[in-house]
Image: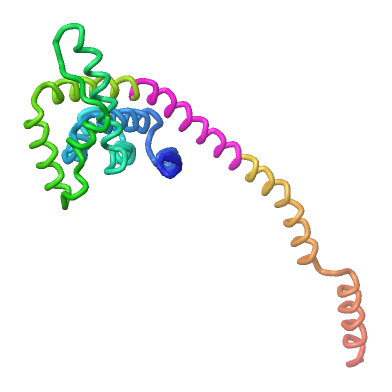
Amino acid sequence: MRRFFLRLRIHFRRILQLDDTPESIARGTALGIFIAMTPTVGIQMILVAVVHTLCKANRIAGLIMVYISNPLTMIPIYWVDYAVGWLVLRPFVELEWHGYEHFSSIFDLGETEGLGGATREFMGRLVEVGTDVAGPLFLGGLVVGTICALPSYPITLGMVRRTRSKLKERRLRLSQRLSVHQPATTDAAAASAAPRPEAKETEAGSDGPAGDAPA
């Protein structure tokens, strides 16, 4: 779990260094988190490309945040989606509850090779378990995705602006330091380039005798 949060921190640092407007980066991050929280394994990259183009958001930020949902975190994230969806639907529909162990056994894709194979296997198991699991899972994914995405926009926007403001201040201080040292360097160069008085006197003295010699 510590490794997951460490990677998340590294990915977020990359987002703060992206070359785009703060608003576009924040939108891309929020949309990427929303997609990562939904049970759309296998088509998340396509969704990022389409949604970010329509919303004029930074696509790289979205792709970075989609990696929150990976083979190690997919089952825990999807089980939270399922639990939230089950709680929302429970007052209206009678649904069978599946605990974490049973849920993880249903969607354990450890032996599946390739992204395409994992996607087909995941969708096939969704069809097998039926609406008792698939309905709460997708509804909960929308709810959890929205809850996570909404605060991520202002947080990312503020962090990007703060990071760029600090970088601007550092560059300003550096330029001020350079401007302070530059006049001293210029004066020293001018002093070294100026002719010395002793050299002028030597030249004048050498011209005198040479002029009297013909007389």
Tell which of 183 and 135 is nearer to you.
135
From the top left corner, tell me how far across and down residue 127 is, in percent. 7, 31
Does residue 76 show up? yes
At a point 25% along the width and 14% down the height, the residue shown is 87
Q: Quadrant of residue 15?
A: top left
Residue that protrudes farthest toward the top in the picture: 91
Q: Is residue 115 left or right of residue 124?
A: right
At a point 92% along the width and 86% down the height, the residue shown is 209
Q: Is residue 162 left or right of residue 186?
A: left
Depicted 137 relative to depicted 114: above or below? above
Does residue 60 show up? no
From the top left corner, tell me how far across and down residue 143 is, in percent. 26, 19
Q: Which residues are magenta?
A: 149-171
In reply to whether residue 166 is colored magenta, the answer given is yes
Tell which of 151 and 137 is nearer to you.
137
Depicted 87 relative to depicted 113: above or below? above
Total residue callouts? 0
At a point 18% along the width and 50% down the height, the residue shown is 111
What secondary structure predominates along the stretch shown in magenta?
A: helix
- Indicate the quadrant containing the N terminus: top left, top right, bottom left or bottom right: top left
At a point 27% along the width and 43% down the height, the residue shown is 71
Depicted 184 relative to depicted 140: above or below? below
- Indicate the quadrant containing the C terminus: top left, top right, bottom left or bottom right: bottom right
In reply to whether residue 139 is colored magenta, the answer given is no
